[in-house]
Image (tube, rainbow, N blue to C red):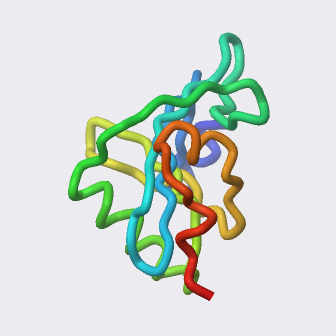
Amino acid sequence: MINAFKSLQANILVQEFSKDIRCFVIDGKVVGSIQRQAAAGDFHANLHLGGTASPVKITPEERKIAINATKAMGLKVAGVDIIRSNDGPKVLEINSSPGLEGIEDITDKDIAGMRKG
């Protein structure tokens, strides 16, 4: 499978487990971020699939990437999932309807109340 993608000169990501950062962006500002870790034996870091979350301090580069990814998709609200790699941060996914599970408890912020209109 990997060789097939290589022959197409496609960029792929192979992951054995998942640990990512969820940045919650509202109106062009990162209002909260958490690190999510997959449950043992799984690669999904999603909390509703058994993953866990903890506080994380993001870098200025990660903040900029999350904001730019949200803008590129034309979104006012997004959950941007980022992984830290040897080549710097990479966007894994941009969620246009991110859930609030975990983010409010971990950051102790009223994320839902931050959206203006």
Residues 53 and 2: in front is 53
**Depth check: 22 or 117 in front?**
117
Q: Residue at x 63, y 33 (%)?
A: 45
Q: Is residue 72 above or below residue 109?
A: below
Residue depicted at 47% across the width and 35% down the height: 35
Q: Position of residue 100 (x, y in %)?
A: 67, 52
Q: Is 89 rendered above or below residue 61?
A: above
Q: Residue at x 66, y 26 (%)?
A: 51
Question: Which residue occupies the foreground of this view, 24 or 6?
Answer: 24
- Name the residue furthest left: 60
Q: Is residue 64 left or right of residue 3?
A: left
Q: Residue furthest right?
A: 49
Specify whether 33 is left or right of 93: left
Q: Quadrant of the C terminus?
A: bottom right
Quarter residue 38 falls in: top right
The quarter in which the N terminus is drawn is: top right
Q: Please state the horizontal and vertical placement of residue 33, each as a whole percent of the image.
A: 44, 48
